[in-house]
Amino acid sequence: MRWRRSRSLDAALGAWTAPPERMRKAKDLFAEWNAILDTHQKPADMPVPSYAQVIGVLNKAARPEDTLIGAAGGTPGEITKNWRVKNPNTFDCEFGFSCMGYEIAAGWGCAMAQEGPGAAGGIPIVMVGDGTYMMMNSDIYSAALTGHKMIVVVCDNGGYAVINRLQQFKGVPGFNNLLTDCRIKDRNNPLHVDFAKHAEAMGAKARHCEDLMDLEAALEWARGEDGPVVLSIASDAWAWVPGDADWDVGVPEISQYEAVREARKAHDAIRARQRVGV
Ligand SMILES: Cc1ncc(C[n+]2csc(CCOP(=O)(O)OP(=O)(O)O)c2C)c(N)n1
Ligand SMILES: [Mg+2]
């Protein structure tokens, strides 16, 4: 076990335990939440899988010593909800800044850290969106150069899906986030990047996965390979697991659009419920 308990906290707590009814309630709520996750993660008859389903497959394939890494796009929210942690210190979600570009560099760093004394020796599994991959992917090459192993899973949902969701939630029709909403040559058939080929060109082993079963098989294959492995899969830009916090992003007070004015009212209601310092 790599985690360190706080000895002073242990000493201060002594033999104290939470009241049994509170423990029971927590366990019941946890079981309820896990049942919700099961319904979202189980394969469904949809053209492309959701983040929840992809994460479900990754979670099943992960060994207790492997580390799941994510940071930006739909990933942080979805992994925070969907990832069932198997061991302390095996979940690295950079949700503070949610900085696009953290993911692959972090995977490389995590692989290095796993070589250190006392490290659990697991594999970094990096989840990254198509938009984020486009912003920062060069440490795939670095990992290939230095011979560090990680598995990068690229979820291609055709653009900035989570910002599209935010934009629409704030009363604005989809614009410039999903490729199909952009001013491009052919909105009906936008140019998609072949992420597997791109990663291969930087020295990674790579495979595009057609579906969840293919992803499952690819993960098994990836485990046996050396250096960075990149797996790409098309994913849904609209399916999210419920249970988010409110998103405190400002909305104009004055707008010609009714939907924006309504979003402003909702925003004010969110602000009114905020508690300073909590
Ligand atoms: C460095 C940086 N720039 C901009 C943002 C704002 N931002 C958050 S998510 C996102 C889009 C991410 O797209 P993608 O990686 O494809 O994930 P998806 O939203 O499709 O899940 C943007 C632009 C950010 N978080 N970090
Ligand atoms: Mg995307």
Image: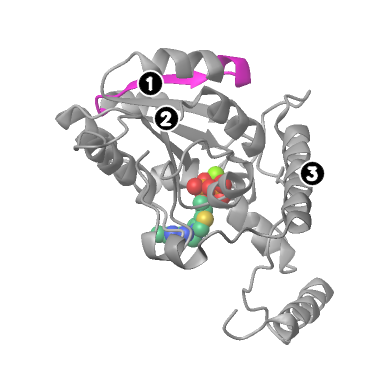
Instruction: Report whether residue 191 is seen.
Output: no
Is residue 69 in view? yes
**Sequence order check: which comes first, mark 2 or mark 3?**
3
User: Vertical placement of 107 versus 230: above or below?
Assistant: below
- Name the residue beneath numbered marker 2: 195
Compared across the picture, whether 210 is left or right of 258 comes to: left
Nearer mark to the viewer, of 2 and 1: 1
Is 111 displayed left or right of 275 in the figure? left
In the rendering, which numbered label is found on residue 133?
none
Q: Which percent across, then down, holds residue 2?
A: 34, 42
Identify residue for label 1: 206
List the residue tagged with mark 3: 32
| C-alpha separation, residue under disc 3 versus residue under disc 1 | 37 Å
Residue located at (66% from left, 59% from top): 18
Specify the segment rendered in magenta: 202-214
Asked if the residue at tag 1 contacts the one at tag 2, i.e. Cβ–Cβ closer than 8 Å, the answer is yes
Does residue 231 sit above or below 17 in this rendering? Answer: above
Relative depth, front residue between 49 and 24: 24
Residue at 47% from the left image edge and 34% from the top image edge: 154
Q: Amino acid at mark 1?
A: Ala
x and y percent of residue 248 in the render? 63, 74
Q: Is residue 207 magenta?
A: yes
Total labels drawn: 3
Side of 267 relative to 208 (left or right): right
> What amino acid is found at the position of numbered circle 2 in the picture?
Phe
